[in-house]
Image (cartoon, rainbow, N blue to C red):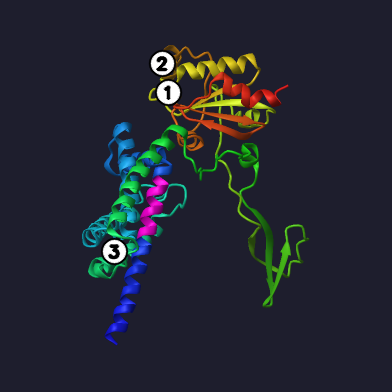
Amino acid sequence: MAERNTKILAVAVNVCRLLLAATFLLSGFAKANDPLGTVYKLQDYCNSMLHISLPETFLTASSVILSTMEFTLGACILFAMKKKSTARFTLLLMAAMTALTVYIAIADPVPDCGCFGDVIILSNTATLAKNIVLLAAAIVIYKHYRLQMDIVGPSIKWLIILLSFCSTIAYSAFCIINLPYFDFRPYKIGTDMYEGVTRAEQEFDIKIVYEKEGQMLELSAEDDDPDSTWQYVETRRIPVGEKKEVLDFHVTSAEGDDITEDILLQEGYQFMLIIPDLLKADEGCINHINEIYDYSVSHNIPFYCLTASFSPEAQKYWTEHTGAEYGYLMADDRMLKTVVRAKPGLVLLNSAVITHKWSNYNMPDTLQLNNMLQPTEQ
């Protein structure tokens, strides 16, 4: 009987281990895939909870460290590396995270925790529930760490941990330079922005309910109203089909006019230079941007610069420091940071469909643009 109970306990311990390992691996990968997304979430936490603003370089380093720590810890748990110390650290971490999410669930300083980036978006209440389950799992493996099953030998374990550590840092750097490899945001390549902006969020079938002498009558919106002996009860909105994602993309001119559809209705190619904050943008790619602008002018391709810097001083600063010959269109800061994870970033549209995106570290040169655009350009 005791042996049977031990086997059941061992199964429970290893199920808890796999649950924790999968969570940390997914969380670490999601953050490594979108380091700037993690930076923006850390900024939200600092602004709303601590009321401070930290340097972006520090937050970027913190983002890479956080993703590396989570992914490596997940690998340590999965392969039962240093069972006791790993279990102890996991328990302390989950206890701290659960306490933090209790506060977040009550105070609601941010709309979602950002644990899994844009891969899985959880409400603050769902995050708390998740952390309570993980805390319970961490307690189980801490109390019975010896029952964790060894999958590989000790020498292989160290190699796996080293590879996990180095590959997470390298992948984070790759995604900072080349943008997230897996794009889970609504503005991924292939997205038809015009369709996304103009389509209805959800279609409904409208039913109007009446009642008379205990009998219910349900009519559609197109039906004639019943006679006055029927009493109105309620109007029901019944969802039809799948809920459609609506893009929160809006652009205004310098004069404040909404020109979103004017831009998205244009046929052919067009460039959108995305600079959320003109005063904090990387000026190291200026020559590339100016070459792209000159290319767009010579090939009659529309070129727009979208920014959340509304002040004339910021726009004057960017113009004087970069020699920019283009004007500025206004858009929401958070929306711009969602479109492309770079400052600045470049987006190429073809009849409102996103075909390419570049960060400030890998802007295309004219040869690349020729190879992409000339075959279909007439």
Q: In the image shown, does 60 or 200 lie closer to the viewer?
A: 60
Q: Which mark is residue 138?
A: 3
Q: Which mark is residue 317?
A: 2
Q: Which mark is residue 278?
A: 1
* Image: 233 above or below 314: below
Q: Are marks 2 and 1 in contact (CB under 8 Å)?
A: yes
Task: Report the span colored magenta.
Answer: 21-31
Determine crowd level at label 1: few under 14, some 14-19, many 20+ residues with C-alpha closer than 10 A. Answer: many
Q: Look at the magenta stretch and give its main secondary structure.
A: helix
Q: Earlier in the sequence, mark 2 or mark 3?
A: 3
Residue 39 coordinates in the image, percent (x, y):
36, 39
Determine crowd level at label 3: few under 14, some 14-19, many 20+ residues with C-alpha closer than 10 A. Answer: many
- Marks 2 and 1, how far apart at CA: 8 Å
Secondary structure of residue under mark 3: helix
Foreground: disc 3 or disc 1? 3
The stretch drawn in magenta includes residue 29: yes
What's the residue at 74%, 66% (across, down)? 228
Q: In the image shown, does 282 or 217 lie closer to the viewer?
A: 282
